[in-house]
Amino acid sequence: METTKLFDAEWNLMCFVWANQPTSASQAAAFALQELGWKKNTTYTVIKRLIEKKVLRRDEPGFEIVPLVSKEQVQQAELQWVLNKRFGGEKAALLATLDQLG
């Protein structure tokens, strides 16, 4: 599965969107101001990037934002990246490391 990797800022905003979908950009901006300390322009820039990455869709009226991928899809894609990049694609090595964490 090929899903775009999300940076931390994108992930934080997407967690709000997934939990409140569909939502408006203004609701996302209010969340980001209160919880992340972002200005409205910052939130709208992150939304624009997520739309360009095809993670979000913008619907009218009201600048409603709708996720195009699920949280689980992003988690799986990022875990697959870690598996391939850090463990040579070997699930046993990943599981052994997880086992050591307790």
Image: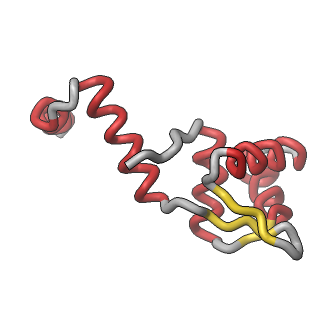
The answer to which quarter of the image holds residue 77 is: top left
Residue 65, compared with residue 102, is above or below; it is: below
Q: Position of residue 47 (x, y in %)?
A: 75, 50
- Give the residue at x 43% y 45%: 2
The answer to which quarter of the image holds residue 65 is: bottom right
Give the side of residue 10 with respect to residue 4, left or right. Answer: right
Towards the viewer: 33 or 55: 55
- Give the residue at x 29% y 23%: 86
- Give the residue at x 71% y 46%: 52
Q: How is the structure coloured here?
A: secondary structure
Residue 17, compared with residue 33, is above or below; it is: below
Q: Position of residue 55 (x, y in %)?
A: 61, 53
Q: Position of residue 89 (x, y in %)?
A: 21, 31
- Give the residue at x 88% y 73%: 62
Q: Position of residue 28 (x, y in %)?
A: 76, 60
The answer to which quarter of the image holds residue 10 is: top right
Give the side of residue 1 with respect to residue 69, left or right. Answer: left
Number of marks drawn:
0
Towards the viewer: 54 or 6: 54
Q: Quadrant of the C terminus?
A: top left
Give the side of residue 4 with respect to residue 84, left or right. Answer: right
